[in-house]
Image (cartoon, rainbow, N blue to C red):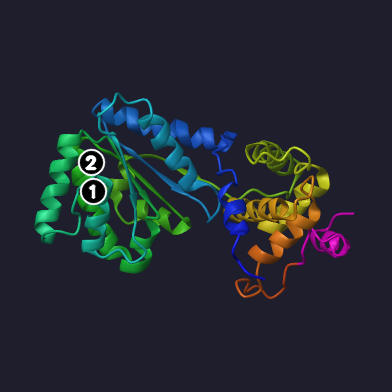
Amino acid sequence: MQNSKREHFEAASQLPQRQFIEMEHCTDILNELDYVHGRAVAGEPCGVVISGPTGSGKSSILKYYKTTWDDKLPAGEPSPIVYIRTPSKPSEILMLESELKALGDPAPRKGTSNSKRERKEALIKNLHCKVFIYDDFQHVIEYRGTVVARQLLDELKNISEEYGVSLVFTGITTVEIGGLINEQINSRFSSLRRLKVMSVENDDEFNYFQEFLEDFSMTKGITNFDMASENSVHRFAYACGGDLRILNHITNKALHYFKLSKDKKIALEHFASAFDDVISEEWDDIKVRKVNPFDTDKWTTVKRRIGIK
C-alpha cells in the first residue's frame, strides 16, 4: 500500500495536544513553588526538592507553573523563573550551557568555562531571576557522584545568597540525596515534596484516578467512550501502570486509529491496537508480559492478574 495520501500524517497532526489537569497533588506543588518564589522576592530565598518516578507529572507541573506565570508578564518583561533541563551526562560545560540556554544566552556554547560562568551570573543579575528550576537533577548525582554534586550545590548556594534566587530540584528519588550531601543547602530548603504515579490500590486512589480520567477524556475530546467507567479505570491503570506519559501515548494512538478507521465512535478495539503499538514486547523487559486489557478476549485474564471479579 502506497503512502501517497499521507493519511497517517493528517490524522496524527489533528490530534488534541495534552493539557495540564490540576489535581489536588498538583495544587500542593504549585502552592509550594509560589512560596519559594515569594520568599525570594521578599529577600529570603529558599527551595524545595520535588521527587517522584517517571510519569508522575513532575515536569508537567513545573512547565505549567512557569507558563502561567510568564503569560501574565507585561510584554517584554523577562521571566523571573528559569527552567533548566539537566543533561543526562552533565559535565561542567554541559551544565553551564544548559543554564545559559535557559537564561536566553544567544550562544551558550561560546567561550571558556570561566567566561560562561561570568555570563551566567551577569544574566541572573540583569534579568532579576528569582527561581531556578533544575529538572532531572538526579543526573548530576548519578553520573558525577556525590563529591561533584556537593561542589555544584555549594556554587548554587552562593548564587542563591548573592542574587536572591530560590532553588528547585526535581527528579526521580535519587534527587533527594541533594539535600543530604550538602547540609547548607538542606537547611535552606522549605520542604520535600514526593509524587507517586496514580494507582487503584485502594478506594481513595481508585476514585482519584477515576476523577483524573474523566477530566483527561474531556481534554482529548472523547465524549462517546467512557474512560472513567469501573472497568475502564482498571484497564487504563493496568495498561500504563500509572505513568501519565504512557496513558497519553496510548490515548493518542487510539484516537489516531479511530480517525483512520472512519468509524463513528472510538471503541475498545482502537485502544487495543494502540496498546499493542505502545507497550511493545521489544521495550517491555519485565518477566511477565502484559496482556492487552482492551482486548475483550483477554479481559478475563487481566482481571485475574489484577485481582478483580
Q: Position of residue 211 (x, y in %)?
A: 70, 37
The image's mark for residue 51 is none
Q: Position of residue 251 (x, y in %)?
A: 66, 51
* Residue type at the position of mark 1: Leu
Q: Residue at x 13, y 60 (%)?
A: 113
**Magenta segment, which residues?**
291-309
Q: Residues within 10 Å of mark 2 (few under 14, many from 20)?
A: many
Residue drawn at x 59%, y 35% is 23
Q: 230 or 49: nearer the eye?
A: 230
Report x, y in % for residue 227.
75, 44
Above or below, 117 relative to 67: below
Q: Amino acid at mark 2?
A: Ser
* Count of numbered labels shown in the rendering: 2
Quadrant assignment for the C terminus: bottom right
Whole-number angstrom distance, CA of label 1 to CA of label 2: 6 Å
Residue 238 falls left or right of residue 298: left
Is 115 situated above or below 28?
below
Q: Which residue is mark 2?
A: 160
Check residue 297 for magenta coloring.
Answer: yes
Crowd rating for badge 1 (residues with CA inside 10 Å; few <14, some 14–19, many 20+): some
Magenta-drawn stretch contains 202? no
- Provide the secondary structure element on which disc 2 rests: helix
Please provide percent x and percent y for residue 291. 77, 67
Q: Which residue is mark 1?
A: 156
Taking the image as shown, residue 127 lies to the left or right of residue 73, namely: left
Per the image, label 1 sits on a secondary structure element best described as helix
Q: Nearer the viewer, residue 45 or 59?
A: 59
Circles 1 and 2: CB atoms closer than 8 Å = yes
Quarter of the image for the N terminus: give it.
Answer: bottom right
